[in-house]
Image: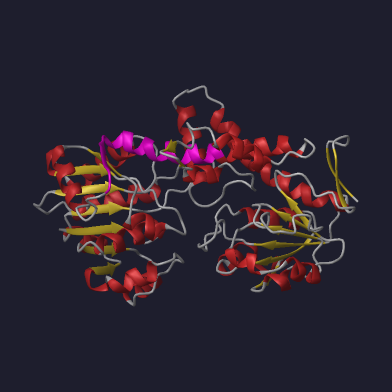
Amino acid sequence: MKIAVFGTGYVGLVTAVGLANTGKKVICIDNDLEKVEKIRKGISPIYEPGLDALLLKNLERLAITSNAADAITASDVIIIAVGTPFDGNRIDLSYIRQAAREIGEAIKNTDDYKVVVVKSTVVPDTTMGVVRPIVLEHSGKQEEEVGFCMNPEFLREGNAVEDFLDPDRIVLGVSSPEVEAMMREVYDGYRDSAILITNPTTAEMIKYTANSFLALTISFSNEIARICENLPGVDSEEVFNGVIHDKRFSPIIGKERITPQLASYLRAGVGFGGSCFPKDVKALRSFSKGLKVDGKLLDGLLHINETQLEHVFSMGLKKFSGKARRIAVLGTAFKPNTDDVRESPGVKLAQMALGQGIQVAVQDYVALSNTKALLGAQVEYYDDPLEAVEGADIVFVTTIWPQYLDISEEDFEKHMPEQAIMVDTRSHFKERKAKKWRHRIGVGQPLPVNGEVEYSLRNNGYGIH
């Protein structure tokens, strides 16, 4: 079996390399010639742990071309993994439509049965209501000559290779039994993984529901955290710890309590970012309104997420009466182990500060190049976090890079000005023994009372002295 993959972003490239790793012949399609040359040399154009090694391992089974027609003609299964950005009102399907047209034109004069797979995240009925008619129109084929499948991805950036090689489930939304048979062959290297067979529209809805549920959990956590911040001595993490000990959440099997990974989403922070959650929740909200569904939950969770960033920013500014001179942002990747800065809380905090005329220094271990593309020369860039915090009134720790934990409180205090504070947006330093470290404020946590920082319920907020 030969497989073509449209697009070499983190979904497309990880999919292509992962399937090649199971022995399949895979052809990547991309019109970015710089990307094409890098992949041919075994160099991943994106930062994703483990991807370079897996790419090099499977180069013999992996081809890359900018000639889509040849790749499609030579393949049995064509996977669409192109971008689907949100244009502010609805999901932009222009790349999907273009791929569908190219597929249709390429298979016009072929006799072999082809399966067209949508792996990009798309709103319900895109596979059958948009891709299918375009492919059939431009190919002149009948429905029984081409099969269609929606195969959503469940890859976490920073863990995408691990997630593809050991998936928790494979969802196949198929248009016919013939398509199911071919897709089972595509994934025959994953015999231990659960394969769920649905129709294409259900598969599309599964993806949106999964991401919206996780986003909802994050926003719920942040709203609870804001309440806790206004109660003396109440730490939101202790509150959530009491919640997740419910056996319906963390079941007791034998004598062992099983705490699900979902519990990690019940934690205060700076909101969700990245290429998936913000875009997908907005797209689902827009789609639901088009269906005249009178729901407010998606509106609410997006509102909480957007205002959480403003809330965290104001936490830092309160000590300086809203007039801080300089801030430092530690971490501009939206999460560790990626260089993706799309919808990054760290980047947005920098932009908020710039909008108020505040000087900004940023540091990240892998995302500085992408950060510069967004922020340009307006900010100062540092590889060393201790250099970045020099002279900063407020330090926002926004990405939980493990390397930050190698820095002691003493080193931070040596480089930070006497009156500076750190807003530890992800509770990265909370477990340190020096819990009353005078510089640190944790989101969703009471401020330390140590003579310098004192919580006041009467002013409905933080009184920092």
Locate residue 362 relative to residue 178 in the image: left or right. right
Looking at this view, is 119 or 97 the one in front? 119
- Work out whether residue 361 or residue 374 is closer to the camera in this orientation and state it: 361
Which secondary structure type mostly characterizes the magenta part of the structure?
helix
Q: Which segment did they paint magenta? A: 193-217
Q: Position of residue 23 (x, y in %)?
A: 20, 64
Task: Report the residue that reaches farthest toward the bottom.
Answer: 41
Q: Residue at x 67, y 52 (%)?
A: 425
Q: Position of residue 384 (x, y in %)?
A: 66, 73
Residue 168 image point, x, y percent:
34, 47
Task: Tell me if residue 399 comes above or below residue 272 in the rendering.
Answer: below
Give coordinates of residue 354: x percent, y percent: 74, 58
Q: Work out whether residue 14 can be spotted.
A: yes
**Occupied quadrant, residue 216:** top right
Q: Is residue 288 shown left or right of residue 70?
A: right
* Residue at point 63%, 53% (across, down): 345
Colour basis: secondary structure
Residue depicted at x 15% and y 44%: 181
Name, please, the residue furthest toward the left: 111
Magenta-drawn stretch contains 201: yes
- Residue 234 or 186: which is nearer the viewer? 234
Compared across the picture, whether 428 is left or right of 68 comes to: right
Give the quarter of the figure containing the N terminus.
bottom left
